[in-house]
Amino acid sequence: MIDPQKSRRPRLRVRGRIALSLCLIATLATFLTLVGPHYRLALDLENVSFERLERATRATATLVNRLQEQTRERHRAIAHTPEFRANLEIADVPTLDALAEMIVERENPIDTIVFTNSLGAIVSISGNRELASIFMDTEFVDPVTACEPGRTANECREIIGPADSVLSANEGRLVVGTSVPLFVRDRFVGRATFMEVQPASVLEEWSSLAGAEVSIHGKDEPRSAFDRVALTVPPFEMRVHASFAAERTALDRLRATILTSGLFALCVAFAIASPLSRSLLGPLHRIEKAAHRIRNGDRATRLRSERVDEFGDVARALDTMLDHLESTQAGLERAQSIGRLGGWSMTQGHHRMRVSRELRRILDLEEQEEEGYLDLAVMRRRIHPADLPAFDTVMKSCEDEGLPFGLDHRVVHESGRVLIVHTQAERAQNDAGQYQIEGTLQDVTERKRIEEQVAKLVYHDVLTGLGNRRLFAEELQKALSLARQNLHPLAVLFLDLDDFKTVNDTLGHSIGDQLICAVADRLSEIIVDMNQIVGEASVHRLGGDEFAIILSQLGDADGARYCAETIARRLSTSVELEGYDIRMSASVGIATWPDEGLDAATLLLGCDTAMYNAKLEGRGQYRFYKPSMREVSKRKLQLESRLRRAIEKGELSIVYQPKVDPMTSNICGFEALVRWLDRDLGQVSPGEFVAIAEETGQILALGEWVLNQVAHQAQHWVEAGLLDVSIAVNVSSYQIESDTLVDTVVGILRETGLPPCYLELEITESALLRNESHAIETLANLKDVGVKLALDDFGTGYSSLSYLRRLPIDTVKIDQSFVRDVLKDERGHDLVASIVSMAHVLGLSVVAEGVENSEERDALVDIGCELIQGYFYSAGVPADRVPEMVAEGFSGHGTTMRNSRQ
C-alpha cells in the first residue's frame, strides 16, 4: 500500500539531486583540502622551523667555542715568546707598559692588554681601557692548583700556565679574551689578559652559517618563541632568532588558491549537473516505460539497447530476464500439463476467475469459455453433485473467514468421464488492499489409483493375497471393539506349518512358496465353508509359514475347536508340487476373548504360547491356551540363559555310547553324547537344549566345546593304550554352514595331538541337503584332514539314495524310526535291507542306532548290518567307565545269536 502522507511530500527530482550532490562533493572536497592538509602543513612547517632554530643555536655555540679556542691559542703563543718572558722577569711597570703597547700595536686583533699582580690588582693597561671592567668582573681558576691535563704542577709553572677564556660584549660587539697566568721561577706573579673586540661582520657571518639571525641582547630584553640563547655573554646574551614569516605568507597564498579552486569546482559541478542528469535519466525513463508495459501484460516488450555502459547492461539484463520469464512461463505451463495441475484466482465478492490453460483442460472447458477467465458457476457445474456441498462449504469459509482448505472431490466431463481432483486455496491481500482467493486444482486420479494399490500392498501379503500382519492387527482391534459392544466371544488362531524349513532347504524356495500359496487357498476355503458355523472370519499371513485366523462372532469355544480340527484334517491331505508329493500339517494355538485375554497383546501372547506347546506334542496338533503353558515359555527362556552359562563355565558333561559288532560282541567305536544336569532345572533333555542352542546361535560354541572335550579325552585314552577305536561326535548343520568347522577341527587336533583317525564326525542328512554343494565341499576338506565321516539319520530326508555316491563318507547310520519298522512289516524290513545293500555296494559301513531288544538286533544282523548301537547293549556311560567297557566287551549279549547262526 502507498502511504498518502508520503505521497504529499515535496519531491526532489533526480536532476536536482545530482546537482546538489555534485555541489556538496565539491564543497566537501574544498573544505577537507583546506582544513586538513593546510593545518597539517602549517604544523609541519613550524616543527621544521623549530628544528632549524635548534640546529642554528648549536652551530652558534660551536662557532663561539671555536673562536675562543683560536684566540686562546694565539694569546698563549704570544705569552710564550722569549721577548715576553724577558720583560716579565724584569717585573718593571714601565717596562710592562711598553711591552703591552708594543703588543697592541704589533698584534692587530688585540685591542687591550691588562697585567695584574698575584693579588689581582691591575699593574699595567694598554689599549681600550673600557674593556678593563670586563677583566675585573671575570673569575679565574686558581693557577696554583690548575694545570693542563697530563702535566704536573711543576711542569706547568715552568712555562705559561693554562689560560682562562674571557667572553663579553661591548656596544653590541663580541669581546673575546684570554687570561694567561704568569710564573717566574715557579712563583705565580700575576696574569696577562688579552682582549679582542670582534667586528660586527662576525655575527653577520655566523648568522649566514647558522641559517638564523645571531645577535647580542641584554638579559632583560624579552624573547619570542623563535628566540634561543646560544650562550651567556656577561652581562649580555647571545641569541639565535628564526623567522616564520615566509612560511606564513606561503600558507596564506595556498589557502587563497584552494578557495579559488573550490569555487571553480562548484561552478563546474553546477554546469555539468544538467547534461549529466539528462544522460542518466533518459535510459531510466525508457526502462520505466518498458516496466509499465510489462506490468500491463505486454511480454513482447524489449529495450534492445546498443549502449556499452551500465545502462546498456541493465537494458540487456532486463531483456534477458524477460526472455527467461517467457521461457519459464512456457516451462511452467508444460510442468502444469505434465503434473496435471491448474491454477486459479478470484477477487473476494466476485465470481469471475482467472484460470490457467491446464485447469481448463482438466475441466474439459477449452472451447466453452473466454481464454484466461472462467465463471465460478461453470466450474461448479463440473463438480460431482455428491461433492458439491463440501466444495461450497470450504470455499465460503475461505472467502469469509480466510481459512485455507484442501479438498479431494470428483469432476464429471460432458462425456461422462469422472476424474478425482485435489483443490486447495487460501485467501491473500493484494497491493490494492483487496482480498483474493488463490488456489490450484490437480488431477490426482492416477495417484489415487496408485495409493489404493499401495494400500493393498501395505495391508495384504504379496505372495498369497491374504491380509498381512498390519491388517491383522487393525482387524483384531476392530473385532475386539465389536465383541465388547455385543458381548460375543472371539477367538484367534495362530498356525505354523510343521517342518516347512525342511521343505525350503531340501526342495527350494520356489516349491516352498507354492506350498504357502496352497495352504493359503485351503485356509480361505475353510473360512468360507465355516462362515455359517463360526460367523464372520478372516485369515491372514503373518510372515514365513505363520498364519492367523480371527473368528469374531463365536457362539462358544466349540466353534474354535471345530475350526482347528477342520484345518488339521484339510491340511493333512498331501499336495503335489512339481512332481513332489508333499504332506502338510500345521500346529495351531488358540486363545479366546474374554476367557484367555481381554486385549490384543494378551490374546497374541496366548496364541503364540499355545502354538509352541502344540508343536511340542507333534505334527498337526492344536492347543487352547492355558495359563500353565506360560511355564513352557518361561522354561525356554530359562534354558536359553542357563545354557549360555553352562557352555561358558563347562557345566555340561559327555557320555559315550558304544557301537558293537554283533558277531563278535566287541566294541568298534563310541558316540559322544552331551548331557546337561542343571542344579535348579535338573536333567535337561538333549533334544530340548540342542534345539534351543540352534535357535539362539549357541550351537557353534556348544559344538566346539564338545569337540574339544572329546578330543582331549580320546588323546588321553590313546596315550594310555586304553582305546583303539574312533569316537563319533555329532555336527549340526549350523556348524557346516558357518565355514568354521574345518578350522575348528584342525585347531583342536593340533592342540590335543589326537590322530585324526580316532575322530569321527556324524552329519545329518538334512544338514547336507540344506546346501548340498557347500556341504560336500566341507566334507571333502574334513576328509583330507583324516577324520572319519558318518551320515546320521539316513532316510529321513527328501532326497534319493543315489546321492550317497557323491558324498565322501565312511559310514551310514540307519535312523531308529526305520529300525522300529524292521519287525512291523515286510515293507519296513525291505527298506532297511535296501539301504544296507546300497551302502555295501558303495563300500560304506552301516550302523543301526536305537536298537533296544534282541529281536531287532537279530533282524538287523540277518540283513547284514555290521554295527549295532542302542540300549540293548548300553546307554551312554561316563568317561571313567569306558576303559572297563572296552576291556570286557558284551560277550553275554551275543551267545544266543552266535549259536543260532551256527
Image: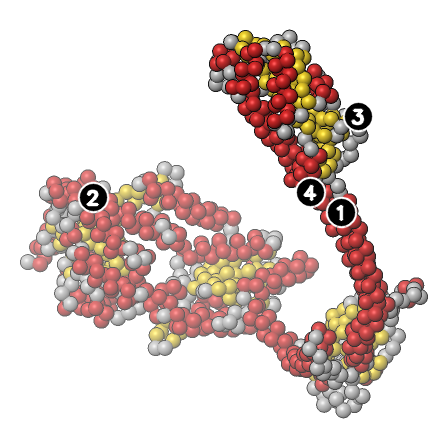
| Of pointers 1 and 2, the one earlier in the residue sequence | 1
For residue 516, say whether it is visible: yes
Residue carrying label 2: 712
| Of pointers 3 and 2, the one earlier in the residue sequence | 3
Distance between the Cα atoms at labels 4 and 3?
A: 28 Å
Q: Amino acid at mark 3?
A: Asp
Could you say where residue 832 lies in the image, as x and y percent from the top left? 21, 65
Q: How many marks?
A: 4
Residue sitting nearer the eye, 518 or 25: 25
Tell me what residue is drawn at x 84 percent, y 66 percent.
267
Element on which disc 4 rests: helix
In this rendering, is residue 485 above or below 151? below
Tell me what residue is drawn at x 70 percent, y 82 percent.
306
- Say whether marks 4 and 1 touch (CB < 8 Å): no
Residue carrying label 1: 246
For residue 811, say whether it is visible: no
- Return the residue found at the far left: 902
The circle on residue 220 is 3
Distance between the Cα atoms at labels 1 and 2?
A: 121 Å
Q: Quadrant of residue 355?
A: bottom right
